Amino acid sequence: MLNIKNLEATIDNKHILKGLNLDIKSGEVHAIMGPNGSGKSTLANVLSGKTGYAIKGDIQYNGESLNELSTEERAQKGIFLAFQYPLEIPGVNTNIFLKTSLNSVRKAKGEKELETLTFLKLIKEKASELGIDEKFLSRQLNVGFSGGEKKKNEILQMKLLQPKLSILDETDSGLDIDALRIVADGVNSYKNKDNAFLIITHYQRLLDYIKPDFIHVLSKGKIIKTGNADLGAQLEKTGYSNLVK
Amino acid sequence: MKQYYDFKIEKIKDLSSDEIDLRKKNLDLFYQTGFPNKKDEDWKFSDLNSILSKNFNNIVNDDFLTKEKNFKLIEEFEHNFILLCNGRLISSDFSHEEINKISLEDFNYKEEKNLDKKNSLNFLNHALALGGFSLEISENYKLKKPLVIYNNFSNSLKETIVNYKNSIIVNEKSELNLINYIDNSSKENFMVNIIENIKIKENSSLKNILINNSKCNGYFYKYAKSDLDKNSNFENYLISSGLKFNKLDMEINLNEEYSKSSVFSALNLVKNEHQEIKTRINHSAPNCHSYQKVKNVLNNESKGVYQGKIFVKNIAQKTDAYQLSRALILDDAAEFDAKPELEIYADDVKCSHGSTSGSIDLNSIYYLKSRGIPEKEAYQMLINGFLLEAFEKLPEGELKNFLSTKLERQINGY
């Protein structure tokens, strides 16, 4: 599904990704761990098409090069980024945002846009699965939401848009244990053989709930070690310092 | 600078010799200074003389004898209406109301006294005004449906100025929701110069909405003076994007205790459009409340201006006055000027003001785009969200929905 070859990314004269290689197949869950400043969020931003980065190397997504695609085109083709810090957008009603988002994706896929009533029924269902109070949906997007509510809202968007590749950028940060479990359940219930996940995290605890097939350690812009789910527990004990020389 | 206007009292029919004399005096006063320019402090950000001279060859006045023309009624909600064409009262419909509670007449120029003489446009209005209306709501009467004033202007107005006066009185314990609706898509350039006097009596309420429905080549100036009695409420909403030029010059007099006024605006200005909101809120009694929130989005080569003055008299203790202007500037060639002024002579008051201008948050655009929303739509969503705040105090319902839809249409382009 995703093939990254020799990816380099530079922003404001800072060379952040320095030749990163990664292959993700359908049905797989990959986790990226690594110390602060290793380039984890940059990888997420670059994959979602955030502007401002000078890019070298190639990213193939389902056989198509991503380099020329805009952020919205990538989203329409099934790449979803759950933000580390979801933005507060005053004046924009959450329901209207969600409906516009879903219909933009549906339209791009050549599917019929949903009428308001059909949409509301759908969103109500998805929200209750994540224990999101309906009242949140009529509020301004993320405005005054707690950290946990914002993260749940990201997962709600993921479940609504049904992406092929979901990138979760430190979705576990700022979550209490209950919220962490709800978010993890949301991911696990969506996981299937046709989609894939790239989970960026600092800590093992999210990976206790969402079991990854691979764990990669990112350091100084490169993947320096790849292992199975046991690598996370090992890192938790020893830290990154043994790996990062 | 070339002379780009030529006004004649002789063009107005059926005037008594006294009226002719008075009008001529006012016209002479106008000619002494001509249209206001930036040397006048009140017009420093809106050099009308320069704007008009660039866009008109020869503005004239006329005695408009207009027949009723076709106009499109608003279908979204039931309402009463008054139809004005080129400022002349053509027809009205109050079928939702008890008819004896409402009085509507042509504005009576013969009884007019105490003329306001603020600026040369007022002189010009006194010299040339024709038409307009006097509306009075009886005491103890709340209109069941809003009143829409359809302001129509005919295409033959090219290079012409329309001047008129209105008077609106809402008597004790009464309530009126008024929508000034401009719907004119004429490509011809024309000018409109209005003086409006509003009186809101004790325990009464007036909602005053100005909305423009289509792009037009009109240059508008309105001087609106309002007087509020005890415990009355006056709310203004301005959604007038699409006019070439518009200056609203509002004087709101909080004359008696516990009166309240507010001004909200939501403007999305595009190429060569210029709008100014100028307010003077006079707190002349204790315990009065005034609130202003002016929001502008400025696209390529547009200009927005807000001059807001709050004046608190020494006896006006416990005044609560607030003003805020916020502008989103989307283009280097766009401009927003704000001049807040507070003049306070009482010592126990709460007065605050603020003004910010900035560009759109690109991270928010990125967030929306990352959810599949195309860039243009993402911008429109943010602009819409920014401006919609102006309706925060309006109750949910068909009127708010109507205004929101119109605002969205203004943002997305007519």
Image (cartoon, rainbow, N blue to C red):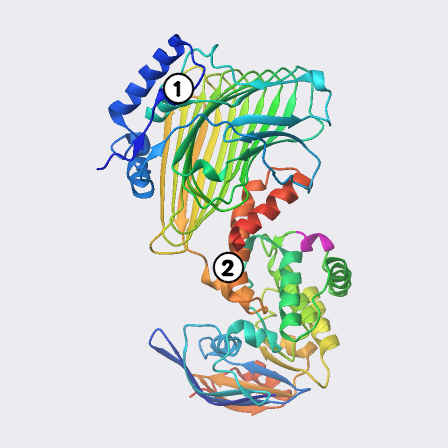
Residue B253 in view: yes
Q: Earlier in the sequence, mark 1 or mark 2?
A: 1
Where is residue B216 drawn, in percent x and y?
A: 47, 44
What's the residue at 75%, 75% (across, down)?
Answer: A189
Query: In this view, which residue lies farthest toward the left?
Result: B1
Q: Residue at x 58, y 41 (%)?
A: B391
Where B90 sits versus A8, above or below? above
Image height of B400 relative to A176, above or below: above
**Front position in the image: B233 or B312:** B233
Instruction: Give the alpha-carbon distance from disc 1 to disc 2, as whole Å.
Output: 45 Å
Q: For mark 2, name the chain.
A: B
Q: Tag on residue B379? A: 2
Picture quarter containing residue B402?
Answer: top right
Q: Specify the subunit that label 1 lies on.
A: B
The secondary element bearing badge 2 is classed as helix
Instruction: Please determine whether, in this image, residue B184 is positioned above or below residue B99.
Output: below
User: Does the stretch in magenta take in A32?
Assistant: no
Q: Which span is picked out in magenta?
A: A134-138
